[in-house]
Amino acid sequence: MPIPERKLIAGIKRMAGSTRSKGVLQGIGDDCARLYIPNGHEMLVTTDFSLEGVHFRQKWHPAESVGHRCLTRGLSDIAAMGGMPIAAFLSLALPKDIPQSWVNGFMRGFQKLARRYGVILAGGDTAQSPSGVLADVTVVGSVPRGTSVMRSGAWPGDILYVTGELGASAATLQNLMRGGAKKTSVLRHKEHFYPEPRIKIGQYLREKKIAHSMIDVSDGLSVDVAHLCEESGVGAMILADRVPMKRALMMSQNKKPTLHAALHGGEDYELLFTARENARVPNRIAGVAITPIGIITKSKNISLTDSMLRTIEPLEAKGWEHFNG
Amino acid sequence: MPIPERKLIAGIKRMAGSTRSKGVLQGIGDDCARLYIPNGHEMLVTTDFSLEGVHFRQKWHPAESVGHRCLTRGLSDIAAMGGMPIAAFLSLALPKDIPQSWVNGFMRGFQKLARRYGVILAGGDTAQSPSGVLADVTVVGSVPRGTSVMRSGAWPGDILYVTGELGASAATLQNLMRGGAKKTSVLRHKEHFYPEPRIKIGQYLREKKIAHSMIDVSDGLSVDVAHLCEESGVGAMILADRVPMKRALMMSQNKKPTLHAALHGGEDYELLFTARENARVPNRIAGVAITPIGIITKSKNISLTDSMLRTIEPLEAKGWEHFNG
């Protein structure tokens, strides 16, 4: 009997720990996982690739970070709907010569994040990869029916808010690209190596009916604000000096202004949302700063403005996308 | 604005056609898809890789066949639970130089099969592939709560049945490996290029409460019967001359016995199920033959027997698995 793939699956199953929860009737081990969705809830599903050489590099990213990051992508999408994550599905193709220690590290990073949010690894697939580590993660969640916060709900006059700070992940990536892998402390660059999905904030904004529309900032603020505006049929003015940036960290390393990284950097996994002008939006939610950065307009233009709302320049969507090489 | 990935997504979204159905409240276009699961139903989720060079080859498989096959894998898993498929999610990484015509063909094959079963392409991801076409397909379905047919339900004394005929797909693969791509007619080898998931049969067996346990034959009968027996804590005797094979096709090409392909071939996408001895199991369901091939035993051995149930040899699980190179 060919052992290796079964052994790999057995190992992953063992590392998955508990494969049942209130939401997971049955995890790994049958043709399909069986999930329980409460009556009156709708299901949320999101799927994201994490490919070696495209989304991460083994020489830059420790295995734990790769496992963490590939799950963050899906959890952040659930957060952006105001949802509660239930289960994750991991399709993992590995090169023949990958050390078991790498797989163990990957699973540790994945599972540590999963447990923090009560997410069960309930299934997936394995294969031998023709080239590099290939991961595809599906995350399933739920939300009371009809309460999902969508991209399409922004109204003219809404205030645009963002959680946390932008640009730190992209700044770290720039460091790495300049060859600073050895000098780039994983601990000092948590925003890049261990980004935190904003699950609690998304749920709060949905439950309190604060957010009209929401998206997560994964491709870069400029791209994601364009997605939100496009789906809502609106435009936006973004006040350049209100965009929250981790200045200290970035200035000390780049010796140049950081606004570009904050506007176009990507992989922030913060939430961008709109609320009506007089909504009671806390300054902090779950310990994270909430910053108003602009206003939604009826005109479909998206522009960067000064503090007097005078246009500095159109905000071109040029965040990180694939297929642009 | 970097156009190509957005253009690709727009193309896929367009080819996806309708992105809503009774079960899909919202498909492509937000952070997550939103699905409706009827009250009192449980959700089924399955995920399968289809990687170029591992699961298919461009020189052997037309693009339409690749699109069809990668969706069949998930639909067949839903069938094996007795479920109704609702939505599919396609993560597709493409090499930079892939022709648009290939992508169009892939999507045609995928969508033609999806429409036949009322499945909506509700989301996914795209990326540039470092090497070859990489697809990962998640299929979501549902079933009335507690009625899923699982691998673990086989009882000693149950009769073991299989749908259709086994081995044809593997025989085609052997042809292709011997360099017969040009001589291998796609139409004459539908079992390999366009395998049909047994959705209707699975649902019938669940609704009529005929099947105690079920699994789809994707890795090969010998491997899949071992999975079923392991999960049920039982064994099986398989009558060698009862295993249904497409003899005509296979004999003419291989000039040798076909039992090996039927037992260990894989990619049949037929259903293997057990029912109690006196259950009323039709000879055909949805036009497909249903064949009794063995009996479930309390002893955990799995053996191949003659028609008098005398053991010929232990049935070793040696179907197609990855990581065995």
Image: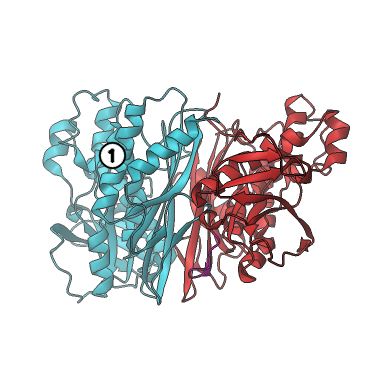
Chain colours: A red, B cyan
**Viewer-nearest residue: A43 or B319:** A43
Q: Using the image, name the chain to which the residue with label 1 belongs.
A: B
Give left or right: position of B267 versus A52: left
Residue B8 in the image: above or below residue A140 = above
**Viewer-nearest residue: B257 or B174:** B174
Give left or right: position of A291 versus A89: right
Query: Picture coordinates of residue B302 (x, y %)?
Result: 35, 58
Query: Picture coordinates of residue B197 (x, y %)?
Result: 27, 53
**Viewer-nearest residue: A192 or A284:** A284
Three-letter amino acid code at the position of disc 1 = Arg
Callout 1 secondary element? helix
Q: Is residue B184 visible?
A: yes
Q: Looking at the image, which residue is at 41% across and 68% down?
A: B37
Give left or right: position of A110 versus B250: right
Query: Picture coordinates of residue B152 (x, y %)?
Result: 40, 68
**Is B321 inside the magenta-drawn segment?**
no
Q: How many marks?
A: 1
* Magenta stretch bounds: A143-149
Quadrant location of the C terminus of chain A? top right
Q: Main secondary structure of the magenta part?
A: loop
Query: Picture coordinates of residue A52 (x, y %)?
Result: 60, 34
Q: Which residue is mark 1?
A: B108
**Viewer-nearest residue: B267 or A201:** A201
